[in-house]
Image (spheres, helix red, strand yellow):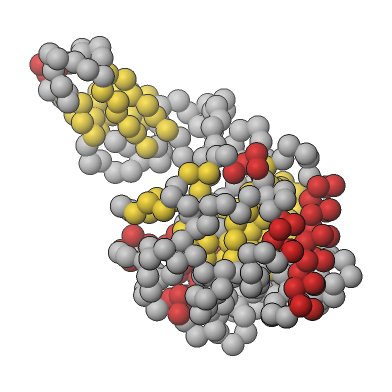
Amino acid sequence: MAANLSSGNFQRYESSGLNIFKGLKPDIVCVQEFNYASTNGLGTSTPAAMREMIDSTFGTNYSYFRETNAGYTIPNGIISRWPILTNGSWDDGDNNINDRGFAWARIDLPGTNDLYAVSVHLKASSGSANENRRSNQIVVLKSLILSSFPTTAWVVVGGDCNTYSETESCMTNLTSFLSDSPKPADQSGGTNTNAGRNERYDRVMASFSFTNTQVPVVIGANTFASGLVFDSRVYSPLSDVSPVVATNSGAFGMQHMGVLKDFTITYTVTDLVTVPQPLLVMSSAGIIRWSGVSNLTYTVQTLTNLAATNWLTLGTAASTTTNLSFTNSDVGAPQRFYRVTYP
């Protein structure tokens, strides 16, 4: 997720932006204007305050990195469901953007490939001088990414590019080594992301080796093939994304819309102590249950069987386990197999 969702008078994360995070439940966020005032007397943007924000919004298992360079009043950062192995902040060279840099983090994804995430907030405002500064920023950023990360790395650059044209030189340079396609959209097909919904500022761009793993964003019964621009005034039903309310995206001082892209990765679980093997057991008469692993999703695939069909159906148990019900007359049919997907 790319998120410049601060609001109010002080460019901080307030209830509206935090609600959007809670409702969308992103795994990784490239966040801009990463400030927060504690509601428990822990100060403003102190380490304790930021930990409070992460714990209450995402969960105590999430990691984060926030720029703390002197003078960075609206720093960038990375929030991650998975451990952050290393991180840092790059200066944008001689472009004199003094209130934030380029925040980056190496994230320990499950499997053998790590993800390198970079949070950016390019120079704002229209006009040729500002376009040139954005262009120069990307020249610096591209050089840093290509020289600092492995050549085969999975890379995501997310954030607020502040662009007024798809043909700005900063964008043509970015898309020479990252994919900006397809363009996420809201339910009405709108791709613009600024507060007024008339400019496409915010983007999630992946390295070409990683963009091949992109899949549709699915929330409730809605599927967004190209990714999602989230606007609480457009999205329906809001019950999918509780505690979001319709006014959140239009809150006073709300910067932009959040942008989501989903990617799927394949890996083999080898640590069966931390992640035990699922066990298929008889729960009661006529009921078998997968147990031993929480938060699994289950799919049943049925091959042709003329003798008996639909003998196995998913039950409605709690999310941590799923009941599988069957009738005695169909037990032993060999044409079915079951696939268990880890979170």
The picture quadrant where one finds residue 11 is bottom right
Q: Can residue 120 be seen here?
A: no
Q: Position of residue 286 (x, y in %)?
A: 16, 25
Q: Position of residue 224 (x, y in %)?
A: 41, 53
Q: Residue furthest bottom?
A: 9
- Where is 210 relative to 47, above or below? above
User: In terms of depth relative to the viewer, which is nearer, 266 or 85?
Assistant: 266
Count the marks: how many? 0
Q: Residue furthest left?
A: 329
Q: On the picture, is 25 further left or further right than 313?
A: right
Q: Quadrant of the N terminus?
A: bottom right
User: In terms of depth relative to the viewer, which is nearer, 115 or 165?
Assistant: 165
Q: Position of residue 300 (x, y in %)?
A: 29, 28
* Residue at screen point 64% across, 73% down: 164
* Residue at screen point 78% across, 39% down: 151
User: In terms of depth relative to the viewer, which is nearer, 52 or 153?
Assistant: 153
Q: On the picture, is 270 further left or further right than 24?
A: right
The picture quadrant where one finds residue 187 is bottom left
Q: Residue furthest front?
A: 167
Q: On the picture, is 82 further left or further right than 26?
A: right
- Where is 114 relative to 304, above or below? below
Q: Position of residue 143 (x, y in %)?
A: 84, 53
* Residue at screen point 65% across, 78% down: 44
- Where is 274 relative to 140, above or below? above
* Residue at screen point 75% across, 57% down: 173
Q: Can residue 231 be seen here?
A: yes
